[in-house]
Amino acid sequence: MQEQYTKILKTYLEEKNEIGLYQAQQFSKKVLENQISPEEVVSLHIEALEHFFPNLPQGARDSFDFLIEIMMGYGMAYREHQILRDKQKELESEINVAASMQQTFLPDEIPEMNTLDVGVISVPASKMSGDYYHFIKDDNDCIGVAIADIIGKGVPAALCMSMIKYAMDSLPEQRLQPGALLENLNRVVEQNVASNMFITMMYGSYDPRVHHFYYSGAGHEPGFYYNNATDSFEELYAKGLVLGLSRDTQFREYHKKVEPGDFIVLLSDGVTECRTDDGFIEREEITRLIRQYSDLPAQEIVNNVFYQLEKLQGFRLRDDFSLIILRRKV
């Protein structure tokens, strides 16, 4: 290493051109790869100078001793930085694995129905999402839909999400009964989730035989119901405690008769709590945007609403964004 450095320095001192500087840059990469400390680099430089200038003034030699002492302190801080950087890379790798795993918990495709047009979009604010949605279709063509928000981020949220998915999959006989499903999920969450994590959920079941939408809520953001005949929105509110607070919580079941052209809007608070430089947007802004695109297919509605709300935020999501629309076909 010393011989190589001396040769590079000699080239630069004699020619003072870009070649010498380029060689110095390449050498610095090797210094990093071999984890050579800053004070060791100074020592390489001093030895090379003594080779070229054996009569180096004593004052100059003493100044290098002073520089080495400074570099020793800097070197310790630098090594700590390297350790932290390595740990950060390891953590980022683990987060990437968890984010990839998290995607497998979401539905691969949206169930198709002759009587229902479904649109869904779910975009995380960062690599890991706290939002979750789920679809299931039974033998009678009834469709169950869940939307949840895990109050927490990162790997714990991903693990919690996996628990919710497999708990729902393990309750096939109750998955299309909103109140019963939430009660079972609540017991699972109460037993297995830390007290500092909370899960809100809205679960609904659409029966195409009678065109009724049955739903229950567990502290989740109210959705909307659009009445096509009156061109009006009303809040789709379902009162209920968040999952996991009390083991014996019961969840009331609500229902709506869905007429042709009517649609149900389910969402996470990342939609209704969009923040701009002027503050939070109003819920009326959400319904205005949905009405603006209401003549489009459901998937195009959610895509356009997301784009407009993302644009209002300067294309920087501050919270996870999930929006689902279920519209009865005319």
Image (cartoon, rainbow, N blue to C red):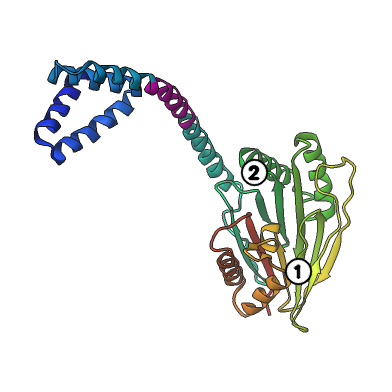
User: In the displayed structure, does residue 117 sit left or right of residue 95?
Assistant: right
Q: Is residue 35 visible?
A: no
Image quarter of residue 160? top right
Q: Is residue 278 above or below residue 127?
A: below
Q: Is residue 67 above or below residue 258?
A: above
Dominant SS type (magenta):
helix
Q: Residues within 10 Å of mark 1 (few under 14, many from 20)?
A: many
Residue type pointed to by label 1: Phe
Expressed as whole percent of the image width and height from the top left, the position of residue 254 reads 86, 63
- Up the image or down, 257 lies above or below 4; here it is below
Task: Tell me: 150 left or right of 250.
Answer: left
Residue 295 position, x and y percent, is 62, 80
The secondary structure type at the circle numbered 2 is loop
How far from the left and from the top, in percent, is residue 136? 68, 55
Question: Tag 2: Cα neighbours inside 10 Å, few (<14), some, or many (≥20)?
Answer: some
Looking at the picture, tell me which residue is in the foreground, 181 or 52. 52
What label does residue 263 carry, if any?
none
Of label 2 and label 1, which has the lower sequence position? 2
Q: Which mark is residue 224?
A: 1
Residue at 78%, 73% (x, y): give it. Answer: 258
Name which residue type carries label 2.
Lys
Q: Which quarter of the rendered picture does the C terminus lie within?
A: bottom right
Q: Which residues are magenta?
A: 70-85
Q: Work out how far the residue at label 2 is from the one at label 1, CA to CA, in angstroms.
A: 26 Å
Q: Is residue 298 left or right of residue 247?
A: left
Residue behind mark 2: 153
- In front of the other: label 2 or label 1? 2
Q: Is residue 67 visible?
A: yes
Residue occupying the point 30% across, 21% down: 63
Q: Is residue 18 magenta?
A: no
Q: Residue furthest left?
A: 14
* Quadrant in which the N terminus is drawn: top left
